[in-house]
Amino acid sequence: MKKVLGPVAIIIIILGVCALLFIPKYNSLVTAEENVDSKWAQVENQLQRRYDLIPNLVESVKGYAKHEQEVIASITEARAQLGNAQTPEQQAMANDALNGALSRLLVVVENYPNLKADANFRQLMDELAGTENRLAVAREDYNNEVQGFNKIVKRFPGNIVASMFGFEQKEYFKAAAGAEKAPAVDFSDSGKQ
């Protein structure tokens, strides 16, 4: 009987040590993944706020810039892409398209001094600027959480636990290609009537 208990005891001790190593690591992976998901929800919240604000901004501009339909159409299309995006990567790409369309809108606005003086338009632009700031902070917070999660998934023994339970690295919210270059702004008289 003693000969059987010896190997069984060793196996139980080994399993106990493994459990003591893997359970905390598993729990830290679950916690880190929840933190990433929470931060992504904040990014989505700010994207939604901007998504909701843009139609009001577009309507304000429409009254002044009836012949600027191309810019308004590009904003509407980019907004629809953002609304249909499902994954963080799709949302990042749609966000980039919307940023480009909004940049073109701001160039158009420069051609209409009366629009810039309109109180409703100014208020909408202030709200948009605030939303852009909140979005930048939310993206940074998300990327920081992704970095922490990815470290756990890559490091030993987290990599073993992650592969055992299907945890995979998360994608960063990345800037669009060419974002390091300042956009070209043209204040020529070509847009004025």
Image (cartoon, helix red, strand yellow):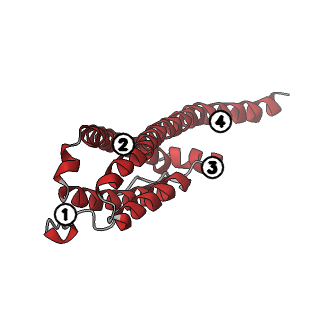
Q: Is residue 157 visible?
A: no
- Placement of the C terminus among the 4 image quadrants: bottom left
Query: Of marks 3 and 4, which one's residue comes earlier in the chain?
Result: 4
Rendered image: mark on residue 144: 2
- On the picture, is 105 further left or further right than 169? left
The residue sitting at 40% across, 64% down in the picture is 74
Between the C-alphas of marks 4 and 2, the distance is: 36 Å
Disc 1 marks which amino acid? Ala
The percent position of residue 102, horizontal first and vertical second, equals 32, 56
Given residues 64 and 57, the one toward you in this image is 64
Disc 4 marks which amino acid? Ile
- On the picture, is 22 further left or further right than 39? right
Q: Quadrant of residue 53?
A: top left
What crowding class fits label 2: few (fewer than 14 Cα within 10 Å), some (14-19), or many (20 or more)? some
- Please name which of the two marks, 4 or 2, marks the residue nearer to the observer: 2
What crowding class fits label 3: few (fewer than 14 Cα within 10 Å), some (14-19), or many (20 or more)? few
Between the C-alphas of marks 2 and 3, the distance is: 21 Å
Query: Of marks 2 and 1, which one's residue comes earlier in the chain?
Result: 2
The residue sitting at 39% across, 44% down in the picture is 56
Query: Of marks 1 and 3, which one's residue comes earlier in the chain?
Result: 3
- Please name which of the two marks, 3 or 4, marks the residue nearer to the observer: 3
Tell me whether the residue at label 2 lies in contact with that at label 3, contact meaning CB atoms closer than 8 angstroms.
no
Residue closest to the far bottom: 190
Residue highlighted by disc 3 = 166
Query: Of marks 4 and 1, which one's residue comes earlier in the chain?
Result: 4
139 up-or-down from 105: above or below: above
Q: Is residue 14 visible?
A: yes
- Please name which of the two marks, 1 or 3, marks the residue nearer to the observer: 1
